[in-house]
Image (cartoon, helix red, strand yellow):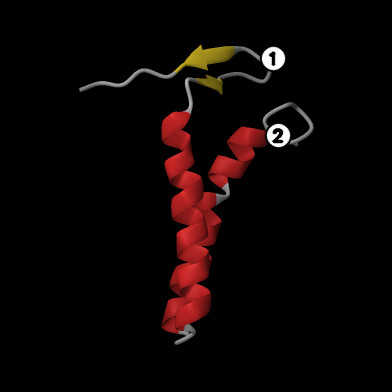
């Protein structure tokens, strides 16, 4: 339902988790190339999150700023 509610980008970022788990699964199945492809896709999606300035914080469409704590 998040896709229909305007949270498409947030859903794509969340998709990095299952892609990573598929990569681990294929790694243990000894399919190294497939595992690498899934893990690289997951890493690219996850790293793209670091470029975001705002994120959807509620189902009403409100956006919240992301801050970096150093």
The relative height of residue 43 versus residue 51 in the rendered view (above or below) is below
Q: Residues within 10 Å of mark 1 (few under 14, many from 20)?
A: few
- Left or right: 45 with respect to 61? left
Q: Nearer the viewer, residue 57 or 13?
A: 13
Residue found at the far bottom of this picture: 30
Q: Tell me whether circle 2 and circle 1 mark residues in contact (CB < 8 Å).
A: no
Q: What whole-number distance in Å separates the C-alpha atoms at marks 2 and 1?
A: 11 Å
Residue 5 location, quadrant: top right
Residue 11 percent across, percent down from the top left: 62, 40
Residue 47 location, quadrant: top left
Q: Residue at x 52, y 58 (%)?
A: 41
Q: Which residue is mark 2?
A: 2
Which quarter of the rendering shows the C terminus?
Answer: top left
The relative height of residue 65 versus residue 31 in the rendered view (above or below) is above
Mark positioned earlier in the residue sequence (2 or 1): 2
Residue 56 location, quadrant: top right
The relative height of residue 27 versus residue 20 in the rendered view (above or below) is below
Q: Residue at x 50, y 53 (%)?
A: 17
Is residue 21 in view? no
Residue 3 percent across, percent down from the top left: 74, 36
Q: Which residue is mark 1?
A: 60
Is residue 15 in view? yes
Residue found at the far left of this picture: 70
- Left or right: 46 with respect to 63? left
Residue 55 percent across, percent down from the top left: 54, 23
């Amino acid at each position: 339902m998040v896709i229909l509610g305007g949270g498409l980008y947030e859903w794509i970022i969340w998709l990095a988790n299952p892609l990573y788990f598929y990569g681990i699964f294929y790694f243990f199945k000894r399919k190294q190339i497939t595992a690498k492809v899934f893990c690289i896709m997951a890493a690219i999606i996850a790293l793209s999150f670091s470029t975001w300035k705002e994120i959807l914080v509620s189902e009403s469409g409100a956006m919240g700023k992301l801050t970096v704590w150093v």
